[in-house]
Amino acid sequence: MSGELKSSMVQPSGAEPTASRSAVPVWIIVLTLLLLFLGAVNFDRSSGWFDKQVYLPYRSAEQLAFYQPKSGAAALAAHGRGVYETVCGVCHGSDGLGKPGQAPPLAGSEWVAKDVTSLARIPLAGLNGAIQVKGTEWNLSMAPMGAGMSDADLAAVLTYIRGSWGNNHGAVSADEMKSARAAINGNAPSEAELAKMTPVERGHAVFQKYGCFQCHGPEAKGGVSNFNAKTAEQVPSLVYVADGYTKDELIAFIKRGERNIPRLNPTGPEPPHFMPKWGPVIKDSELSDLSAYLFSLKPKGDKLDF
């Protein structure tokens, strides 16, 4: 049998070679498809989509533009975008469209088009009460997130807001911001006056400066409505905060904030008020004074738990 097979495989001398059909191994097909997929992914990430100005290590025209040296208006807008994404974007969104029930839109907002002082009053002094934005009423509190910013930083972020998402309004200079701050702050204590105060007194000034009273009340006793919050649907009191934290723990909590407030009804809506991330906004020295003030609120000899 084996002899017959061997004789059938031997071709006569001078015969034309012939090809036979056979299946392609599966692993070759899989490897080919994998190489095509990886090539497409690499092309999508690194090609710049045929833009001849884009080359490694840059992957897109947007990334290339971001890393180019900037000056003048471009530098101001780039700096403003960074400040916005760190401080403002959490509530108002990176697209400026806001979040239902939490923060109004900035894109197309009539407030963005107002004069510098009127616009700056919101981040410097905060906002509490009903306002109309693009025909919709909003009745929420906003802490003065810009109170701790320098004039240059606040001017940059307002310039970014006034020139983004279809807004087309003028830039804001640091000098304009300085004048607006002076007009808005009015009776705020000077640096010299603050230096003469005790840590508790300075902490109370910080409590006022950053609008903590808007949610926690003028005497830090809470009570502001916070629908569906587990804390009796109210912003909690701070009077007994010393029972729940050390000063270092309290400062760390204020720095990181609390974005997700525990809900009374887990399937209900998200509570409108939350603790902002104050770390990038409030100075360490101010946080130290603020913790001293909050710890001073507990009545002497009171043993109640926080």
Image: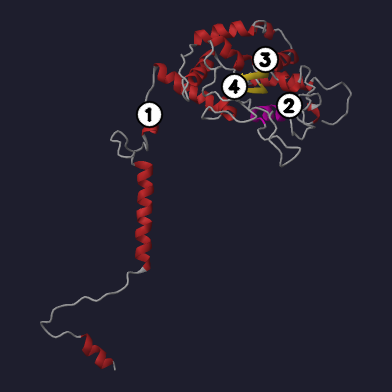
Give the vertical position of 215 relative to 194 (above or below): below
Instruction: Estimate the x, y position of residue 249 in percent, counting from the top left.
Output: 71, 30
How many marks on residues?
4
Q: Residues within 10 Å of mark 3 (few under 14, many from 20)?
A: many
* Amino acid type at image mark 3: Lys
Q: Which residue is mark 3?
A: 209
Dot 1: within a 10 Å radius of its alpha carbon, few (fewer than 14), some, or many (20 or more) residues? few
Residue 13, image x and y in percent? 11, 84
Residue 158 lies left or right of residue 300; in this view the side is left
> Counting residues from the N terminus, which is met first, the one under dot 2 or under dot 3?
3
65 or 279, which is in the foreground?
A: 65
Residue 288 coordinates in the image, percent (x, y): 69, 21
Distance between the alpha carbons at the discs numbered 3 and 4? 30 Å
The residue shown at (12%, 82%) is 15
Give SS at disc 3: helix
Looking at marks 2 and 4 on the same chain, the residue that comes earlier in the sequence is marked by 4
Q: Is 298 on the left-hand or right-hand side of 108?
A: right
Tell me how far mark 2 sits from mark 1, CA to CA: 44 Å
Q: Quadrant of the C terminus?
A: top right
Q: Which residue is mark 2?
A: 247
Residue 147 makes an appearance in the image: no
Q: Nearer the viewer, residue 213 or 272?
A: 272
Q: Marks 1 and 3, Cα distance to the nearest angstrom?
A: 38 Å
Residue, disc 1:
65
Read off the magenta span: 247-257
Looking at the rendering, in which quadrant would you find the N terminus? bottom left
Q: Nearer the viewer, mark 3 or mark 4?
A: 4
Sequence-wise, the earlier of marks 2 and 1 is: 1
- Of the two numbered discs 4 and 1 on the same chain, state the one appearing first in sequence: 1
Distance Cα–Cα, label 2 vs label 4: 44 Å
* Residue 135: assigned label: 4
| Mark 4–mark 1 distance (CA, rounded to whole Å) | 37 Å
